[in-house]
Amino acid sequence: MKKILLLMVGLALAGCSRQTDAPPGAAPVTETPAPAPAVPPASSAGSSSDDGRLSPELAARLVREHSPVLGPRNAPVTIVEFLDPACEACRAFAPVVKQIQFMHPEHVRVVVRYAAFHQGSDEAVRLLEAARQQGKFETALNALFEGQQDWASHHAPNVDRAWQLAAAAGIDMARARRDARSPQADQVLRQDGEDVVALKVERTPTFFVNGRLLTDFGDRQLMALVNEEVARAGVASTP
C-alpha cells in the first residue's frame, strides 16, 4: 500500500500550475478577479531567518479567520496547504497529509487555503465553503477528491456532478446553494485570491510549514520538513 501511495504522489509531483492548466480566457483565481494587493511578492519581501521562513508581513497572510483548520487549533506546527479541489496532485497528496496528521495527532494542524486555478474550481470552492458552514468541510473535500474524475475535467468541468457528490456525502443542498452565493463566500474567494498573488503561489498543492515554504516538492520532503518543525517545537513524534 505504501508503495502504491508513493507511486501516486510520484506521478503528480509536478503539481497543477496556473500557467499550464488554466484555460484560455479563464480567470485564474476568482470569478471576478480582484486587484493585486499592495504587498510585495514573496521573492522581494525577504524572510525573517536563514531557514526560509516568510517575513512577518507575508506570514500574516498564511492563515485567515475563515480558513478551514483540520486538527488541534493550538498545535505547535501548522501546515498551510494551498489547494485546488480539481487538482490531481492535491488529491494524490491528501493521504500523505492525513498520514502526517496520524503521526502527529496532537502537534500538527492543517490549514486549507484555496488556489482556484482550474475552470470551475471557483464554484467548487463555493461548495466547500458552504459545507464548512455546516461543519462538513472535510466531508465535502473528501467527496470531491474521491469523485474528481467525474467532475473535474480541466476544460469541461461538470460542476453539477460536484454538487451531486456533495449531496451524496450528506450536505444540506438547499442551505449549501444559498450559502455558496453569499457575500461571505465572495469574500473568501477574493481574500484567498489576493493571498495567492501576494505569496506567489503558482502551483497546487503549495505547502508552508510554520511559515517555511516547501521548496523541494515531494511527499518525503514534506514529511521531513514537518518532522523538523516538530522537533524544533520540542515534542516527540508518535511511534
Image (spheres, rainbow, N blue to C red):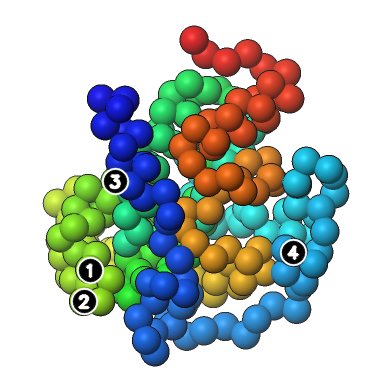
Q: Is residue 233 above or below residue 195?
A: above
Q: Confirm or deny contact between disc 1 and disc 4 (CB under 8 A).
A: no
- Image location of residue 11, percent across then percent down: 33, 47
Name which residue lies at 26% across and 32% down: 4
Circle 4 residues within 10 Å: few <14, some 14–19, many ≥20: few
Q: Nearer the viewer, mark 3 or mark 1?
A: 1
Q: Confirm or deny contact between disc 3 and disc 2 (CB under 8 A).
A: no
Circle 1 residues within 10 Å: few <14, some 14–19, many ≥20: some
Give the residue pinned by disc 4: 43
Give the residue pinned by disc 3: 142
Q: Amino acid at mark 4?
A: Ser
Q: Quadrant of the N terminus?
A: top left
Of 44 and 151, which appears nearest the observer? Answer: 44
Of mark 4 and mark 2, the one earlier in the sequence is 4
Q: Confirm or deny contact between disc 1 and disc 2 (CB under 8 A).
A: yes
Looking at the rendered structure, which numbered label has been put on residue 153? 1
Circle 2 residues within 10 Å: few <14, some 14–19, many ≥20: few
Give the residue pinned by disc 2: 156
How far separated are the C-alphas under marks 3 and 1? 17 Å
Name which residue lies at 67% across and 17% down: 235
